[in-house]
Image: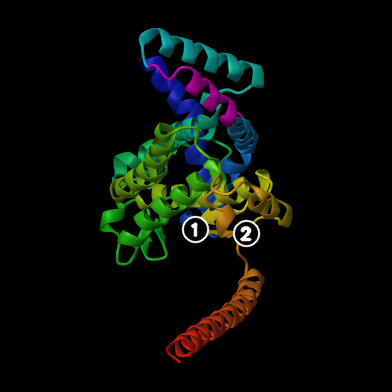
Amino acid sequence: MEFAGSIWNELLMRPMINSLALLSDVLFSNFGLSIIVFTVLIRVVLIPLTVRQTRSMKKMQELQPRLKVLQDRYKNKGPAEKRALSSETMKLYREAGVNPIGCLGPLIIQMPIWFGLYRAILRTMPPTPEGMANLSAAFYSWNPAISSVPINSKFLGVDLVDFVQGAPLPWNFALPILVGATMWLQQKMTSGNQTPSSAQQAQTNQIMLWMLPIMFGFFTFQFPAGLALYILFSNFVGILIQYFVGGKQPVVLFGRAYLGSAEARAKLLAEPSGSSAGAAALVSDDDSEDDDESGEKDDDEQSTDVHRQDSRRGDRRRARNARRRSRRR
């Protein structure tokens, strides 16, 4: 147990403490900017994993039709069918070179970083003399930031050591909402515009899309504000990386497509009707104007058709009346 503690301290805690303190010393003694720059550096280091995750998600999306065929083949939910379906699915993944667990790579890697950063923030700005002594022992001998201790923990009026729920208005509510919203957007971009192969998968996707952001939004109330700042900017950087690494795919939000390259938007629009939630929503401002003009034309044509139909009805009515008069005579 002591050996594991030493590994944790030497490989994670001390590098984090020294990095945060050094960045703060370089960035005008601003610990908030230190956390932001530290976040960007961590996300840049994780770019290879993000690229692998994006490619894996794209391959998974391409495999959806074949997975649907397998699920239809083994509709019976007996034990034998479940084992066969699982075996065939794993075989399909191996043939395509896809590792479903690989899609969670960046999230799994970031979990120890979050836990380590939680402790590193508290140790970098300790409230007691004993904590200051421990902080001095954590510094590397070459780190000039030791002369800047104690480090100022204020950033935009928020004490980065205190919990978010104790932050002044509006940050005590804004930080959890922003963390949840950016995590939701990142999840939305990661899952892409893929069509689920079954109703069960669609339900699972919706649960994952909403559960993690809501859960982390509530958890943020119990995080130090510095950790919430890290997660928030990590999500921002992750969104940018996902957008550019993923080929500038359009982001479908609430029935409308935003951003994306012209090629990606055209591809989304060309998908079969109903296969993508965003295909019918791919409408730009210019398209809206065209729709308005075409709508006006349609209205005019419809009005003309109505007049023609009324005219024909009137002609028929007059012909019937004329025949009736002739019979009476």
**Does residue 113 appear to the left or right of 315 in the view shown?**
left
- Report if residue 243 is visible in the image: yes
- Residue drawn at the location 31% of the way across and 54% of the way down: 164
Left or right of 26? Residue 110 is left
Q: Is residue 219 above or below residue 321?
A: above
Does dot 1 land on a helix, a strand or a loop? Answer: loop
Dominant SS of magenta comes to helix
Q: Of discs 1 and 2, which sits in the foreground? A: 1
- Image height check: is 32 above or below 71? below
Residue under circle 1? Answer: 255
Q: Which mark is residue 259?
A: 2
The magenta segment is 63-76
Furthest-left residue in this view? 166
Q: Residue furthest top?
A: 80
Q: At which x and y percent is residue 234?
A: 51, 47
Q: Amino acid at mark 1?
A: Gly
| Helix, strand or loop status at disc 2 | loop
In the rendered structure, the answer to whether residue 233 lies left or right of residue 55 reads left
- Is residue 70 covered in magenta? yes
